[in-house]
Image (cartoon, grey):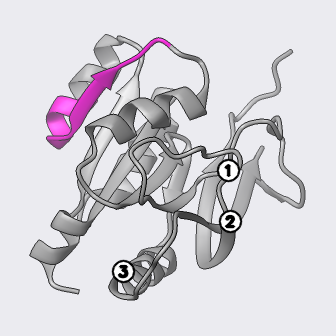
Amino acid sequence: MNQNNLIDSLTVVIAALSDHAAFADCLDALRNWPVRLIIVSKKSANIEKMIRDEGCEWVQDDSPCSLSLWEKGLECSATSWNLLIRSNEVVSGHLKKNIEKKILGPCLTSVLYLPRLKIIFLKKVLKHPLSWSGEPPSGLLYNTSSNPNLISIKKESLEGELICLRDASVSI
């Protein structure tokens, strides 16, 4: 896909809820991909500095919920295609290529394409998620309405991996 077409077609909305190291990995994986990045997070000096260094857009929101942060980021997006991820998730190269292919194809209704989630916790790959299932999953959103319902939207699978980096320690 042409670099200019991609930046005009896709916005990546990142719900920044994780620690500094995982967030740096997330941004590093997106560094050479010509897309518009919108990061939604609480006010934090570390996050602000990282965002300024990367040249991303930043929206402040104090919600502890990914869904609320994504909705705030979608308000700022001007594209129909939006990749909704959390700051502890890394987009694989294979997933990027499949997203670029998906954007080229026709899509008539709002849909959330879900990549396979690979969860890394204590340097091990987990078979089952550690997160609360009430939060919507990360994915590629094709949005035809101004305010999509991410909980009840139609969902389809998308080839590729989204690598989720969980905290390096167990805390209660």
- Dot 1 amino acid type: Pro
* Region rendered in magenta: 50-62
Q: Comparing marks 1 and 2, which lies closer to the viewer? A: 2
Please indicate whether residue 44 sits to the left or right of residue 129 in the image: left
Residue depicted at x 55% and y 50%: 89
User: Is label 1 in contact with label 2 (beta carbons under 8 Å)?
Assistant: yes
Element carrying mark 1: loop
Where, quadrant-wise, is the N terminus in this rendering? Answer: bottom left
Q: Residue at x 24, y 61 (%)?
A: 35
Q: Can you tell which mark lies on residue 70? A: none
Q: Residue 122 at x, y = what percent?
A: 78, 44
- Residue 93 spot, x, y in % from top left: 44, 76
* Image quarter hosting the C terminus: top right
- The answer to whether residue 146 shows anywhere in this view is yes
Please give the name of the residue rendered at 56% of the width and 59% of the height, measured from the top-left corner: 139
Q: Which residue is mark 2?
A: 155
The amino acid type found where label 2 is placed reads Lys
Residue at 36% across / 80% down in the picture?
A: 100
Whichever of labels 1 and 2 marks the residue nearer the N terminus, that label is: 1
Label 3 neighbour load within 10 Å: few <14, some 14-19, many 20+: some
Asked whether 111 falls inside the magenta stretch, the response is: no
**Earlier residue among tags 2 and 3:** 3
